[in-house]
Image (cartoon, grey):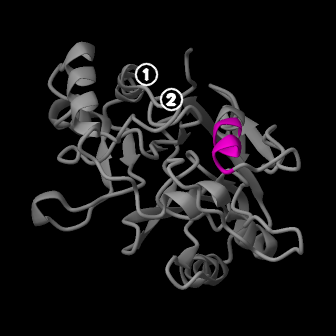
Amino acid sequence: MTYAVNMDVSPDVEGFFDEATNTITYIIKDPSSAHCAIVDSVMDIDYAAGRITTDHADQLMARIKERGLTLDWIIETHVHADHLSAAPYLQSHLGGKIGVGARIMEVQDTFGKVFNEGTEFQRDGSQFDALFEDGDTYQVGEMTCFAIATPGHTPACMVHVMGDAAFVGDTLFMPDGGSARADFPGGDAGQLYDSIQKVLALPDEMRLFMCHDYGPGGRAIAWETTVAEQRAANIHVGGGKTREEFIAFRTERDKQLAVPKLIIPSLQVNMRAGHIPKDDNGNPMLKVPVNGL
């Protein structure tokens, strides 16, 4: 697949860090208009109390309104297992279309069974407005953007390229953070390596924006790097590490990782494009499968 990269377009990118989940959400403005996109929004949850709030999403909305922007797209780089999406909430106030990778259907099928969702839960991706295939393009104002399929962390992972900026989701972390796990259902370390190589084949100067950062070694939180920096210094794949070396490392490393603390609510909500499931009486309700994850 050959991608139509346009390094002459440089969107304004504003990051918003959510300390509770170490997630970075982005507002990306088309440089030629007042149109924008949001990538990987966050809905706040107090899991123990069973309470969902909108502080993080409200901050995004306030900023978009303050800048006088029109929201065209709400992009999910994948079905997150560590935070809830605020996509429907944002859409209800600001408009825009919600988009995700077309392989969301595989994720829905897998976790529809885990959470015993029954036949009423649609596993066709119809909860989303757009299902992106590898190389699909879309518009943010006058800026043509495109999606790169990057399975490995999950089947539906995609990197979204907007001018000289690429939003990598969990495909990569900062160079000193390496890469994401590949042991979730549908994940595959070999596929993840191949996907990362697609990202590293982009122009050296391409700006890369992370979905998460954990400040390894106590450094300050950061979320922007470049293809050249990742290719040279990423601790998991940089410096010419081979596919076999990566698979061996990633497989052993993943065995040591704990399950994300918000995986149960996150998957149920995010595979529905951010909608909270309801019980037979129409009340918001989450399930806890025992020994199911």
Compared with residue 269, is residue 232 higher up or lower down, i.e. above or below? above
Kindly indicate whether the residue at mark 1 contacts the one at mark 2 (C-beta within 8 angstroms): yes
Residue at 48%, 49% in the rendered image: 10
Q: Position of residue 61 (x, y in %)?
A: 64, 78
Dot 1: few (<14), some (14–19), or many (≥20) neighbours within 10 Å?
Answer: some
Residue 100 visible: no
What count of labels does the image hold? 2
Compared with residue 47, is residue 255 higher up or lower down, i.e. above or below? above
Numbered circle sitting on residue 3:
none
Q: Position of residue 292 (x, y in %)?
A: 54, 47
Q: 118 or 193, which is in the foreground? A: 118
Q: Which residue is mark 2?
A: 151
Is 114 inside the magenta-drawn segment? yes
Q: Which residue is mark 1?
A: 191
Q: Position of residue 79 (x, y in %)?
A: 58, 48
Residue 118 visible: yes
* Amino acid type at image mark 2: Pro
Q: 174 or 82, which is in the foreground? A: 82
Q: 225 or 22, which is in the foreground? A: 22
* 66 on left or right of 96: left
Is 291 inside the magenta-drawn segment? no
The magenta region covers 109-115
* 142 on left or right of 95: left
Residue at 28%, 47% in the rendered image: 257
Residue at 36%, 74% in the rendered image: 19
Q: Quadrant of residue 51?
A: bottom right
Residue at 51%, 63% in the rendered image: 83
* 194 on left or right of 117: left
Q: Position of residue 219 (x, y in %)?
A: 14, 64
Separation of residues labelled 2 and 1 (CA atoms) = 6 Å
Q: Quadrant of residue 67?
A: bottom right
